[in-house]
Structures are given as C-alpha cells and as structure tokens.
Amino acid sequence: MTMGSDLLNTPLFGIGLTLVIFELAQRIYRKTGSIWFNPVAWSIGLIITLLMVGDIPYDAYAVGGKYILFLLGPTVVALAVPLYQRRTEILARKKPILIGVVVGAVVSIVSASGTAWLLGGSKNVVLSLAPKSVTTPIAIGITEQIGGIVELTAALVVMSGCLGAICGPEFCRLIGIKNNAAVGLAVGTAAHGIGTARMLEIDRLGGPVAGLAIGLNGMVTAFLLPLMFILFW
Amino acid sequence: MVRGFALLLLFQFLGEVLSRALHVPVPGNVIGMALLLVALGRGWVSFAAVSEAAELLLSHMALFFIPAGVGVMLYFELIGREWLPIVVAFFVSSFAVMAATGWTAQLLDRSQCQGDDDDGE
C-alpha cells in the first residue's frame, strides 16, 4: 500500500495516465469519426472519473501533470510559425480579423455576464463569467482585477475551450459561416487554445487565424472588460 | 530539433521578462509568440530553425490542455452552488461569440477581398 501511494506521487503517474488515456481517446475518436468523441474532453472526463473513483487527490496527478502543462508555453510561442507561413492571407484580412475579434470580445463579455445576471447569479459569479472565452493566464488576471472568483473563471475557460473544440467548426458551418478564416477566428475567439488545437487539425488557414485570435481577444478583453466594469457596474 | 526548442523557450523567456517588466496583463507566451513572429518576418530567426520543433508541439497542442482541464474537478462544488446561471450563460455566450465573430469577419472579408475564397456562392 505504501509502495502504491509512493508511486502515485511521482511524475510517472500523472504523465503516464494522461498519455495512456489520451491515446485511447484518440483511437476512439478516429474510429468513430464523431465530434462527440472529442479526445480532449473525453480524456479530461475519464481522468477526473478515475481520480474520483480511486479517491486519488488532484495534487498527486498534478505532480506529473504539470510537466505536460509546461509544454503549453512553448507551444503558444510556436503558433508564430504557422502565422508566419500564412502571413499573406492573414494580412489581406487585417480589417475583418481585427473588427471580428473586437465584436466577439464585446459580445462575449455582455452575453456571459448579462445572461448570468438575468438568471439571478451572484455578483461574484457574474464577474467570473465575463472573461471566460479568453486564454487562462489573461482570464485569471482580469478576474483578479475586477474581483471575481479566480478558480471559477479557470474552470469556465477550460469548459469554453472544450465546447468550442467539440462543435465550434460544425456550429459555424450550420449558421452559414463558410469562410475558413472566419471560422478560425470565431473558434479562436470563443475557445482560445483548445479550439485552436482543433482548428489546426482541420484547416491550414483557420488554424493559424484561431491562434492569432487567442492573443488578440486576450488583449482586447483585458483592455475592455475592466473599463466596462468601471462604467457600467 | 534541439535548436528549435531552444529558440522557442528563449522567446518564451523574453516574453515572460517583458510581461513582468511592463506590468501588462498579457501572458509571457503570447508576447513570445508576437516576438517570434517579428523575428521571423525580419529574418533574425530562420524559418527552418524553428519549424520542425514548432510543428511537433503544435500537432500535440490538444494533449497539453488535459492537466489544466482535470483541474476543473477541484471546482465542481463551486459550480454546483449556482449551476443554473453558470451553465446557461456558458452555453448562450459561447455560441453567441462564435456567431458574432464569424458573421462579422465573413461579411467584411467578402466585401474586402472578393473571389479570394474557394467557397463562392
């Protein structure tokens, strides 16, 4: 028993579990070809279930998990490479991209906090929802600044990412958005990095544009949200 | 390949330093991305030096989000306390953002550079 719990607290457990589950989830996703088997969302769900059933604390998982999380940093930097490759197409769409992100950022803030407010959400919850479409580090910074619950924002950011990755591109096609750059921009603005990961898999222009949207939406929201908070709250 | 990873980490580091020094709410890795883009454009960093490492990381990007996602388990209780406004606002807003952003970009793109897309109606 002691040997078992010793092993649980080594990086081997968190890294190993994540890779095994993700590989499994990807196989199921490829075999079924169905968007409802999104490998990221299923991996997260399966690992949470296993940890809860096994009564294993998140901290034990995080001993290894944090090494995988670390790789996210250089991966975001690496988004410069496909952006550079697609620079001509992207520069030709400067205006639609910039205006699209600003409109998306405003709609995100207003619709998320507005809906929660109308349904009787407490002030803390309303504020924590506002930056939910922005990449985690920026979203946390904003929530701290306006006085929401940082943990709730972090959880909502991940959930937004999963939703956008699962059905973002399909939803866009459904409502008549056929332009590949516009789909990438929409998914990147609503679902930051997790949405971008999906876009990179399916489209050579939409992927980099989604990556650009992570940074742009982050900056626009970081600027607008505290301002709107001061003006309207 | 090692050179590529070294460059990516170097730019992330530069981004982190700038993010802290300037006290901006933009994370270091996003600043690092912007810096690398400028460096590639100016020819300070050659495309060949970073492309292999970048493509390897980007093709596994989804995997790197899993540990953060598992962290949601710590906040189930918090979400459960006011689940109705949270869940409804979450869905409404996610779809509203995609529709607003996508429609706006498509509309402006069509009027700006027509015939550029392969999806002519």
Image: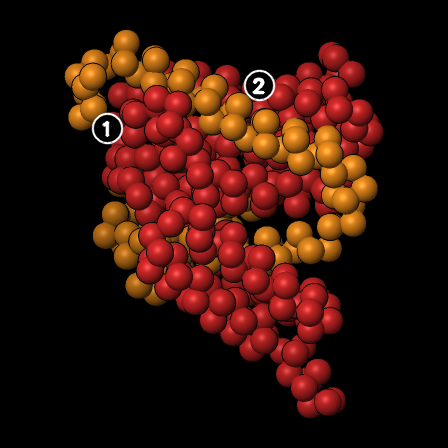
Indicate the quadrant where residue B59 lies.
bottom left
Specify the quadrant that holds the N terminus of chain A: bottom right
The chain ID associated with circle 2 is A
Q: Position of residue A33 (x, y in %)?
A: 33, 52
Chain B's colour is orange
Q: What kind of element bears circle 2?
A: helix
Residue annotated with mark 2: A106
Please give left or right for residue A77 compared with residue A49 in the image. left
Please give left or right for residue A207 compared with residue B27 in the image. left
Q: Position of residue B17 (x, y in %)?
A: 57, 45
Q: What kind of element bears circle 1?
A: helix
The numbered dot on residue B7 is none
The chain ID associated with circle 1 is A
Q: Earlier in the sequence, mark 1 or mark 2?
A: 1
Q: Position of residue B95 (x, y in %)?
A: 52, 28
The numbered dot on residue A88 is 1
Q: Amino acid at mark 2?
A: Val
